[in-house]
Amino acid sequence: MTVISLLIMTYFRSWTTHVRRQRRRSRRRAESLARGRPARRARSSIGQTGGCWSIEMTGCLWPCVGAAVAGDGADHRGLFRSKPRTPVEVVQHVRDLVTYVLNNKDGCAGGRRDAKLEHRMLELSKGIKEMKGILYGNGEDDPCEEACKQLTKEFFKKNTDTFRQFIVCLQYVNLDTQKDVTQVIANLQRQKVDSRLVASDYLEANLDLLEILMSGYENLDIAIHYSTLLRDCIRHQVAARYVLESPHFRTFFDHIQFPDFNIQSDVFKTFKELMTRHKSTVAEFFSKNYDWFFAEFNSKLILSASNYFIRRQAVQLLRDILLERSNSAVMMCYVSSKEHLMIHMNLLRDDSIAIQVEAFHVFKLFVANKEQPPEITSILRTNRSKLLRFLKDFTAVEKDDKKFEADKATVISEILALAGAEN
């Protein structure tokens, strides 16, 4: 090995050691700030380490210089700021800015804003981005657990109602800030303080916020953001139960038919989350709302839906609902209906093979039902020859789908047995 190779190896080892020290120092600094302790005073040293000159500046009084030299993500807010805000101070600062914007919301309606409002709006965007950085990390280091805990406690602090302010203020900020707000709130839904999901406790005491989010579908400019926020909220069972019991829930069937594809697909995503996430709550909902729900579901999402995506997703969702063990009573009721059978026999002739396959997975439940009502058996027997001809050449979207082929063979066997039962 040549002398040059040895020098190069020594240089890179020294540089790696230097980078690791800088990262450890940055992490200790973040944890110190999260605990409310002042950062260590400036310490600058220039020395030679393993043949590599390095410059170290920790806790520098000039954050912009420290960041430029150390590259440790130090704060860039100003030349005369001695340290970044603590997580609690960040939330308090953002809360003050949101309050100011809401008090001057008439100036946000369009036209030219006054300089003071414009400055506060810019500071608000920066503050929310700072909250996002604390909760998600800076890209190099993981978020500090203690910092996240302090931010969460302050955000949901009693009598501050910061969550409500964020939701109401959403329509007055720019698109990038709207995205940051939804990401911040999504993260806060999962944050625990003393082993408790504080967001769940907050929502239980402020269920009217869910009404605000559901009514947000009427404003197309914020519909997707409100839908995303609602979807994050219904992770909590108390929120999901409230939405299912709300009169606003029926409007989902209309919102899913919005002409804007992005909105309708996002609304359907939230609708699916509601109908599948909390099994016991959904089963309780069906026990009280079976008739109107499936009447709306079949007529608006399957029969009259013009959008291929919605129709396919709706039939797929129906299959998932019926096959869920906690919904066994719902399945038996659904597959005992002559009208429902006719809907899915017609879907077997749909132009889309994908929809045909999804319809087949529901149709097989009618055939496999050991307690078929006479009218179901009569329809299957009458259409026996047509069904057998169709199933003979019917294939799945993916070739060699063994599960699909096994299900098809079972259905064919059951239909053939109908002739023997007749004789």
Image (spheres, rainbow, N blue to C red):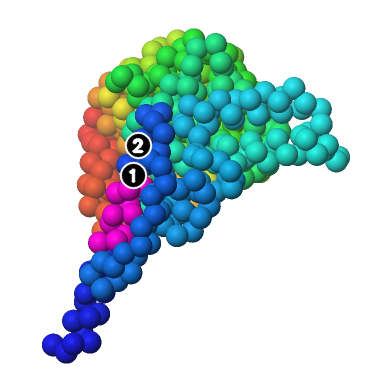
Q: Which residue is mark 2?
A: 31
332 relative to 63 in the view: left or right: left
Quadrant of the frame with the C terminus:
top left
Q: Which residues are magenta?
A: 17-27
Q: How many marks?
A: 2
Relative to the observer, which residue lies in front, 128 or 17?
Answer: 17
Which of the pair 11/365 is nearer the observer? Answer: 11
x, y (%) of residue 187?
Answer: 43, 34
Q: Is residue 292 visible?
A: no
Tag of residue 249: none
Q: Using the image, determine if residue 18 lies above or below residue 263.
A: below
Check residue 318 for magenta coloring.
no
Q: Position of residue 290 (x, y in %)?
A: 46, 16
Q: Secondary structure at mark 1?
A: helix
Query: Which residue is located at x 71 percent, y 28 percent?
Result: 101
Residue at 24% in and 47% down: 403
Say which quadrant the N terminus sits in: bottom left
Residue 27 disc label: 1
Residue ID at (81%, 31%): 107
Q: Name the outermost residue toward the bottom.
A: 2
Q: What secondary structure characterizes most of the magenta part? A: helix
Badge 2 amino acid: Glu
Residue, x 31% and y 64% (percent of image)? 47
CA–CA distance between discs 2 and 1? 6 Å
Residue 51 can be seen, yes or no: yes
Which is more toward the observer, 408 or 152? 152
Q: Residue at the left extreme?
A: 1
Amino acid of disc 1:
Arg
